[in-house]
Amino acid sequence: MTDRTSWAGKPYHPISLDYHQRFGSKVVKVPVSIADTCPNRMGLKGMQTCIFCDEHGSFAYAESQGLDLAKQIEEHRTKVASRFNAAKFLIYFQAYTTTFTALGKLRQGFDLALGYDDVVGVVVGTRPDCLSDAVLRTWKEYSEKTFVAVEVGVQSFDDDQLTWMRRGHTGAQAIKGIERIAAEAGVDTGLHLIFGWPTETDKQVIETARLCNSLPITNVKLHNLHVLEKTPLADMYRSGEFIPADLDLYSERVALFLDHLDPRIAVHRLVALSSRWDELIAPEWVRHKMKSWQGVIDRVNARGAYQGRLFGV
Ligand code: SF4
């Protein structure tokens, strides 16, 4: 859907629209965790924990980590159902690097999730260099009977930024991983991107949008680089090595990105919305979820920006 009139007044193509079109009613994601680590945390090939990643591997429900999967699905589904007034769900294997766990565990997780009548598909979070042939075959197999989506933590395509955040992969590896998912699994693919890097330029943001436009993806999720307790970034912030982007600067980045993003690409969100703000150190402007989201929207609107405004220019 590329018609702005269907975006409910938002300056971007909301993913909720695609879900509604695909499933015929409102659908929300239910985060769960079956992984308990990732290549970075394991220190494989000299890798280190990504500088922004908290001890829960970016999982929304840290208090449930370690609970059996059925219990997680049922508890978290109840929470999101009442919060978003939804009756259909996608089970989102969110924490750490899900494809770093045993494939059998992932298959069991899919089977369990898809056994619920109100679950219409599965979503897997992973990183671009953790895509075995067997994982891709499994996604293809399940996509023949249900909706399978993958969210790839790319964060940036710039190698200097990737090195600075200790991702342990390059921009070229990210592109290759995304293309492999399309060619070998053919499943719905989205990217997680972070803006607010110290060295970030307008040109980079525009290039990122253009690269997204050229890749076989259907959606993106934007995060502002923010500082959480017990992360390497917390030390960098306290020593003055990192200063987070303020609301105006971050909103400028988002506006620029949206302006150049193909309107066919759906957007999950424009700003990080964590569920553990007690762990937030900085910036202060993201402490209040709806206020920070609205703050970005207001500034994007004030600039006259909207998704696709400069697409192809
Ligand atoms: S962001 Fe992902 S890859 Fe990086 S340390 Fe966290 S769980 Fe591991």
Image (cartoon, rainbow, N blue to C red):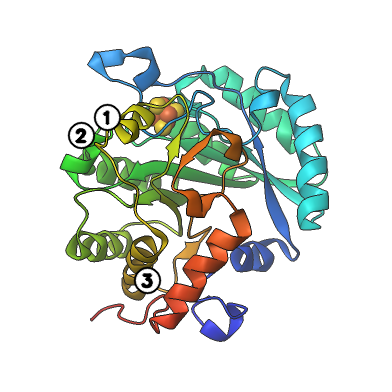
Mark number, residue 142: none
Q: Respond yes or no on whether mark 2 lies under 8 Å from ligand 1.
A: no
Q: Is residue 131 visible?
A: no
Tag 3's secondary structure?
helix
The quarter of the image that holds ligand 1 is top left
The amino acid type, in three-letter code, at marker 3 is Ala
Give the crowd class for mark 2: few <14, some 14-19, many >=20 residues within 10 Å: few
- Image: 280 above or below 313: above
The percent position of residue 118, horizontal first and vertical second, equals 81, 47
- Labels 1 & 2 near each other (Cβ < 8 A): yes
Name the one closer to the observer, 241 or 173.
241
Q: CA distance from mark 2 to mark 3?
A: 26 Å
Q: Position of residue 80 (x, y in %)?
A: 76, 47
- Disc on res. 255: 3
Determine which residue is flagged by label 1: 166
The percent coordinates of residue 44 (x first, y second) are 30, 14
Q: Is mark 1 within 8 Å of ligand 1?
A: yes
Residue kind at label 2, given as amino acid type = Thr
Which of the marked residues, 3 or 1, is nearer the chain's N terminus? 1
Secondary structure, mark 2, is: helix
Q: In front: 164, or 302? A: 302
In this image, 183 relative to 28: left or right?
Answer: left
Q: Which residue is mark 2?
A: 163
Query: Viewed as shown, does residue 138 lie left or right of 64?
Result: left
- Image: 153 above or below 303: above
